[in-house]
Image: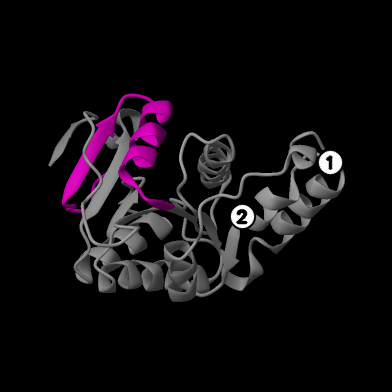
Amino acid sequence: MAHDVAGRDTPAGGRRIASVCVFCGSSAGSKPEYGAAAAGLGREIGRRGLGLVYGGGNIGSMGVLARSALEAGAHVTGIIPRRLYDLVEHVDLDELIVAETMHERKAGMNERADAFVAMPGGIGTLDELFEAWTLRQLGFHDKPVGLLNTLGFYDPLVLFLRRVANEGFLREFMLDDLLVDEDPGRLLDRLESAPPIREPKLAERHR
């Protein structure tokens, strides 16, 4: 079913994380390992009884992720901008939400998730990743953020972020806060056990 963004409470449960927002691409990528990683993450989310929130697409990594999560019993919520909704076919999801803008889409994803994972993807994935991570840094939420580093896809980005930190534009505690792992299950374990973001000391605030 499809409806406008109206807000939905995060699923209640006895765990810190009940739903995971996954940022990923509408493309499959150049290597089969990317699709396998999407399928593995979807299965692991379902196996743990977690909900999946994602961008609502039916092709590429998005489609593989959603179908695998559904088959594993996860409650899957897709949030898609109307511009794309009118152009594509859709996976039969538990919930499909149509947002009028990309800003509204990302706000809906942020509201409905307890943690964020970025899979290999393009500039849209990177946009979503950095917005979620920035909001955590600024204290708008305390939801952990991680990278599924399939085939070392994010190694160059992590190296660049290390350069950013070394040049004084990113505090070390925030770089350490970004969880990076190549294994879907291990990454989810780390997200579920992630401590609250550490408040920097006064000297760190002014670096």
Which residue lies at the image location 30% right of the left edge and 62% below the top edge? 15
In this view of the protein, can residue 22 be seen by the observer? no
Residue appearing at x 54%, y 37% in the figure: 131
Location of residue 48 in the rendering, given as x and y in whole percent from the top left corner:
28, 71
Q: Earlier in the sequence, mark 2 or mark 1?
A: 1
Residue most extreme to the front: 202
Q: Is residue 83 above or below residue 131?
A: above
Residue neighbourhood size for the residue with mark 2, other residues' Cα within 10 Å, grouped as few (<14), some (14–19), many (≥20)? some
Rendered position, 139 above or below 21: above
- Residue named by callout 1: 168
| Quadrant of the drawing holding the N terminus | top left
Tell me which amino acid carries mark 1: Gly
Q: Position of residue 172 (x, y in %)?
A: 74, 51
Which mark identifies residue 98?
A: none
Front position in the image: 5 or 173: 173
**Which residues make up the magenta segment?**
89-115
Q: Tag 2: residue type?
A: Asp
Residue 104 is left or right of residue 122, and the answer is: left
Q: Which residue is mark 2?
A: 177
